[in-house]
Amino acid sequence: SDKPRHVLRKHAAWVSALAWAPAHLVSFSTDGHPNNLLASGSKDATVALWNARTGRLAQSLAGHSDGVEALAWAGTGLLLSGSRDRTIKVWGAQSVGGADTQLSPFTGSTTFVLKATLAGHAHRVNTLALSSAHVCRTGPFEPFTPDGAKKTTTTTETVRDRARARYDAYVEACGGAGFAERLVSGSDDATLLFWPKFVVGHERPKGSSGSSATLYKRLTGHAQPVNAIAFAPDARKFASASFDKKVKLWNGYTGAFLATLTGHVAACYGLAWSPDSRLLVSASKDSTLKVWHAADDAPPPDAKAKASGTRKFAAALETLPGHADEVFCVDWAPNAAHVASGSRDRTIKVWAP
């Protein structure tokens, strides 16, 4: 249909961020329909939670003192909001009876409460990235089974169960719940804050005082505001993009610096990883995209290679021209078939890797 199913109106200022709850946390109505939960962040300093099936506002979360710029759902059910007030709020579901819910589907009786306030940035928070983002985004869908046969997903219950199985497998591959959910935030202060263990279930970070958590590692190296951060699908690395024209790679478990990828001649706006975590594509104000080899077994550098610390990465594998103006966003299809880029020139280009 060319008409929206619902028009959601409650915010008092423009909407700046949206995020869907993970598929493995979806509940069902009495008639069997999924109650997909959508979070929206606004310049009005609130986060709204919506039942996408009914179009009704489930809850409004107030706590920030300035506009909300970024949202992210953890696989545990925690919702994170980054704001112009320089903080990150951690919201968690709590049942009517007061007991915490962990990895339980959200129901009509579920309410969200503030679990922690993460402070540390000296300027507005622009972007949030969670190590579980890829598995939460793709839910039950995998392009192929090991034998090459396509999977089919028919019922909403199957969707939720398979998504939960994939998330559980991801947690096990990371070495347990204590390592599966890691957060990185980026700010106009030109730094990243790496929060390695604060989203284990609904526990407050150890060493925190009251509702304010300070357990983080500050990652420096960018010279201008950080615009985008993205974890690799395997969660072993993450990348950051900045106005300083640089893309940086970091260790996804420790936050250790790995390399600086240079080549863009203007600000970098967006990042996207290939599903196999081997390639990274960046979008820039210079009207191009660049594809980088970011695998652990990157080939030996040539004369133009960039060396940083103990790690070396070759120069960009490829530069993708074609846009007539700044490239603001980029995304890699979960099945690896295509890359899409959006530009100020009012076009979307679809690339075949």
Image (cartoon, grey):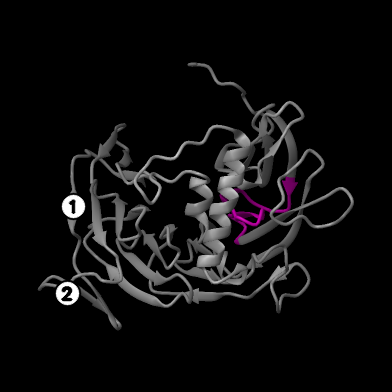
Name the residue: 62% across, 60% down.
Answer: 88
The boundaries of the magenta stretch are 61-86
Taking the spot 56% from the left edge, 55% from the top edge, the residue there is 167
Residue matched to label 2: 300
Residue 316 visible to an observer of this rendering: yes
Comparing labels 1 and 2, the label whose residue is closer to the camera: 2
Dot 1: element = strand
Verify CB contact (< 8 Å) between mark 1 and mark 2: no
Rendered view: 124 above or below 208: above
Circle nearer the N terminus (1, 2): 2
Q: Nearer the viewer, residue 255 or 154?
A: 154
Comparing 189 with 152, the one in front is 152
Up/down of 351 relative to 2, above or below: below
Three-letter amino acid code at disc 2? Pro
Q: How many marks?
A: 2
Question: Does the magenta run of residues contain 68?
Answer: yes
Q: Amino acid at mark 1?
A: Thr
Q: Tell me the number on the disc at residue 121.
A: none
Q: Is residue 173 shown left or right of residue 36?
A: left
Q: Position of residue 289 (x, y in %)?
A: 25, 50
Q: Position of residue 93 (x, y in %)?
A: 75, 52
Marks 1 and 2, how far apart at CA: 19 Å
Name the residue carrying label 1: 319
